[in-house]
Amino acid sequence: MQYFSGRFKEAASELILDFHSSIHFDQRLYRYDIMGSIAHVRGLSKMEIISKEDGCLIEKTLLEILEDIENGKITFSTTYEDIHMNIEKILIDRIGDVGKKLHTGRSRNDQVAVDMRLFTKDEVKKIQSYLIELIEVTTNLGKEHLETYMPGFTHLQKAQPISFGHYMFAYSEMFKRDFIRLNNAFELLDYSPLGCAALAGTTYPIDRKFTAHTLGFKGPTLNSLDGVSDRDYLIEIMSALSIVMMHLSRFSEEIIIYTSNDFGYIELSDAFSTGSSIMPQKKNPDAAELVRGKTGRVYGDLMALLTTMKGIPLAYNKDMQEDKEVFFDAVDTVKGCLQVFVGMVKTLKVKNEVLLLACNDGFINATDVADYLTVRGMSFREAYKITGEIVSYCIDNGLNLETLPLEKYREFSYIFNGDIYETIAIKNCVEKRKSLGGPSKESLLSHLERLNEFLDGAKIDLINYRLNDIM
């Protein structure tokens, strides 16, 4: 049976039916499709387009179909192409001609559009919940290490001392932005296209505001042509997810580096590491490497949909069926990576002594030597030049800034006194940096308070979110 068979004299070939069919991947929308249909039939009944009795029978049967799907009692068929036609066929098989009234004033174009928006709303909130878990993990780990000093890097070369807490809070901020970015995208997708029909709305006196609010949307989309053509919200969410993966990939890269034998700053738990099939001594950060690798996959999903949409005229075109697999893959990949990351970071071991020892080379307190001279009246550029000469002397003579004798310091500038050694002590280098966002304990405690305020608010937002489950 073909739902478009009235127009055609010949049956479609099995090849084209299989080629068209999307049921093997869009069946995961079954719950959202039934939700949309219940809202639609309630709207038809409210406006007396169908009788209340027919509306109640259709809704009751749709709920029975939902229960049967979730209990594994229904097998979908490629004969009916997609999840929409499969569910409608089951409905008609069960209640006959009354079931044929469901599609009054509706097209698959607005049906699939509302399904995808409902699905996307739910998935965004799931991803945000994982982001909150990860922010809590990085924030709590940072809180434990406010005074665990380590080298900070630029160009992967030791630059200035920071604390491990400062380092963790940097990632808390990144993932916080990801949460906010998804919130911003959510605001634009939270409008219902149900009632746009194929592209030009419908002649039936439907109430689109009623169905939109029934489904938990802010309201209806305002142009029927745009309502069924729009996939911006998927692209925007996938763009945000690509940035999430970029952040996870950067974090993964540092985990891989910092767990290596040459650094040894941190150690992953056995539960989040793997071994080698031939080298018994190996403990590999495969989870971090896989997250880094999967980043390109999510980027590819985004580019695939952008490329699909770039040349499509209004309104619906069959090309748009290609939105689902890449979007499903992107959200599934991101959710999996976030869950792995929460466990991996939560169980990693920070090697405090190794981190502190790593501060003893690389001249990471050189900027503090220059600042010492500057606060005593020398211009920063002159202080910078003199400090560079001191570093060069130390390198040539196997010394560091802590072991350079005071008389040598004074050969470079009479300004130096014995307090230079206290000034360049690693702890003091960090704790003097009390500016907003700096690595001192004082600054970090202020930052911690703000992160906790954000987490409290974000959790409330997630608790308040309810996909309006009309079933």
Image (tube, rainbow, N blue to C red):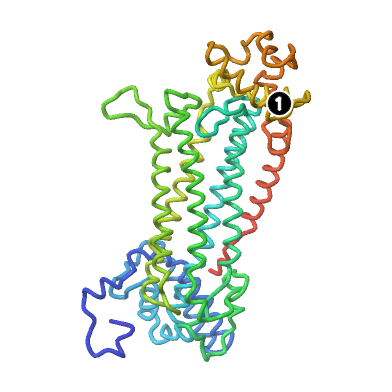
Note whether 149 is above or below 436 in the view shown.
above
Q: Residue 416, position in %: x, y? A: 73, 15
Point 37% across, 67% down: residue = 322
Q: Residue 143, position in %: x, y? A: 64, 32
Point 56% across, 82% down: residue = 43
Point 62% across, 29% down: residue = 162
Left-right relation of 379 to 322: right
Q: Which residue is mark 1?
A: 371
Quarter of the picture holding the N terminus: bottom left
Q: Residue 101, position in %: x, y? A: 45, 86
Q: Residues within 10 Å of mark 1 (few under 14, many from 20)?
A: some
Point 57% across, 30% down: residue = 152
Note whether 62 is above or below 164 in the view shown.
below
Q: Nearer the viewer, residue 208 or 43?
A: 208
User: Which secondary structure, mark 1?
Assistant: helix
Left-right relation of 25 to 117: left
Note whether 248 is above or below 217 in the view shown.
above
Q: Residue 173, position in %: x, y? A: 61, 44
